[in-house]
Amino acid sequence: MTSTEKSQEVGAALREFIGSTEMSFPDGHKDILVMGYFSLALEHHHSISLLITHKKIGSAFALMRPLVEIVFRAHWVVGCATQPQIDQIHQGDEFRFPGFGQMADDIETVFKANSLFSKWKENAWGPLNSYAHSGHLALGRRFSGHNVQPNYGEGEIYEAVRSSNASLVILGKMFFTYFNRADDAKIIESFLEPESPSGPQ
């Protein structure tokens, strides 16, 4: 079994655990947003794994950006947004979130995240955008020599799977903590793979 396949198994076990937890449907605007973000992140995470299994690596890489974006936005909504901002986000798409650099700074101030989000933004945001928006990195992976053939290394595929798992764990930890499920927050953190960021403590 390859490292990628092992990481996919971790991701599947993670989703199975989340699916086994019982949650009541929220009624406050913030609760609804947090629940919606988490639900969408779960689907993105599963889709990334499925796309990789079926060798649709370019599409899997393109989904990494919206997954990471959900992690940022959900943390910002929970810890930084005012009630009027939450109400506006709930009502429609007119609200303009802060830029990712500002969101990272805001999140780290509130969650004491030890530069996790600012480093995430600094190191990953450029590549994530390139893969999501048909940029140089995305187009460059469509060729093998002079042939039009997808060209992705096993190491970078594994890193994408591992990073998607870490994204879901970091989001899930915040999600369960927000809904006063401390035991579940501890369990979900146990799914982190070696050398993955742990998220806010």
Image (spheres, grey):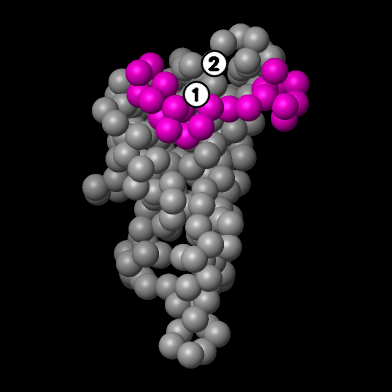
Vertical order, 176 against 116 (above or below): above
* Residue type marked 1: Trp
* Residue type marked 2: Ala
User: What crowding class fits label 1: few (fewer than 14 Cα within 10 Å), some (14-19), or many (20 or more)?
Assistant: many
Residue 173 drawn at (x, y percent):
41, 29
* Residue 90 is covered by the magenta coloring: yes
Residue at the far right: name it.
Answer: 91
Asked whether, in this view, residue 158 is left or right of residue 134, the answer is: left
Q: Residue at x 31, y 26 (%)?
A: 113
Q: Nearer the viewer, residue 9 or 124?
A: 124
Asked whether, in this view, residue 142 is left or right of residue 26, the answer is: left
Q: Which residue is mark 2?
A: 81
User: What crowding class fits label 2: few (fewer than 14 Cα within 10 Å), some (14-19), or many (20 or more)?
Assistant: some
Stretch of the chain drawn in magenta: 88-110
The total number of labels drawn is 2
Q: Secondary structure at mark 2?
A: loop
Q: Residue at x 41, y 29 (%)?
A: 104
Residue 195 drawn at (x, y percent):
24, 47
Disc number for residue 76:
1
In the rendered structure, are the residues bearing label 2 and label 1 in contact, judged by CB atoms less than 8 Å apart? yes
Q: Residue at x 75, y 21 (%)?
A: 91
Residue 137 drawn at (x, y percent):
46, 65
Q: Quadrant of the N terminus?
A: bottom left
Vertical order, 158 against 103 (above or below): below
User: Dominant secondary structure of the magenta stretch?
Assistant: helix
